[in-house]
Image (cartoon, grey):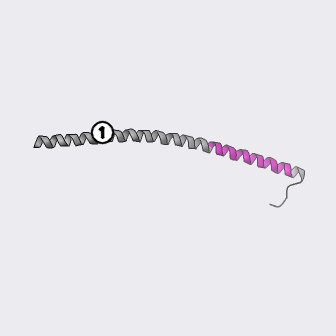
């Protein structure tokens, strides 16, 4: 009876080890996916900041043009 219990426990432990290996593999895969998403997000933010800077420069240029043409209100 003791051998049967030992064999049963060994089989249970082997199943747990297999599950743990699968979970570790899945975790590594998810970590890679998250890292890729973070890189993409950083790139998107960089693009957004560049667009904001471009819009700010264009706004300044339009303001200067309006001032030169006398189209700009002095009160804001």
Q: Quadrant of the C terminus?
A: bottom right
Point out the stretch of residues depicted in magenta: 46-66
Nearer the observer, 53 or 32: 32
Residue 64 among magenta residues: yes
What residue sits right under mark 1 in the picture? 18
Image point 72% across, 44% down: which residue? 54
Figure quadrant of residue 9: top left
* Helix, strand or loop status at disc 1: helix
Image point 18% across, 42% down: which residue? 8
Total marks shown come to 1
Q: Residues within 10 Å of mark 1 (few under 14, many from 20)?
A: few
Outermost residue, bottom side: 75
Outermost residue, right side: 69
Residue 36 among magenta residues: no
Report x, y in % for residue 60: 78, 49
The main secondary structure of the magenta stretch is: helix
Report x, y in % for residue 6: 15, 41
16 shown above or below 66: above
Report x, y in % for residue 49: 65, 45
67 shown above or below 17: below
Nearer the observer, 42 or 30: 30
Q: Quadrant of the N terminus?
A: top left
Figure quadrant of residue 53: top right
Report x, y in % for residue 70: 89, 53
Apparent side of residue 2 relative to residue 66 in the rendered image (left or right): left
Image point 51% across, 39% down: which residue? 36
Nearer the observer, 40 or 66: 40
Image point 80% across, 47% down: which residue? 61
Apparent side of residue 37 relative to residue 5 in the rendered image (left or right): right
């Amino acid at each position: 009876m003791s051998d049967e219990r030992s064999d049963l426990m060994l089989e249970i432990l082997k199943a747990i080890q297999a599950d743990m290996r699968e979970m570790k593999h899945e975790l590594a895969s998810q970590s890679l996916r998250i890292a890729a998403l973070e890189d993409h997000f950083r790139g998107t933010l960089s693009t957004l900041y560049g667009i904001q800077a471009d819009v700010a420069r264009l706004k300044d240029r339009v303001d200067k043009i309006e001032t030169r043409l006398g189209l700009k209100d002095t009160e804001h």
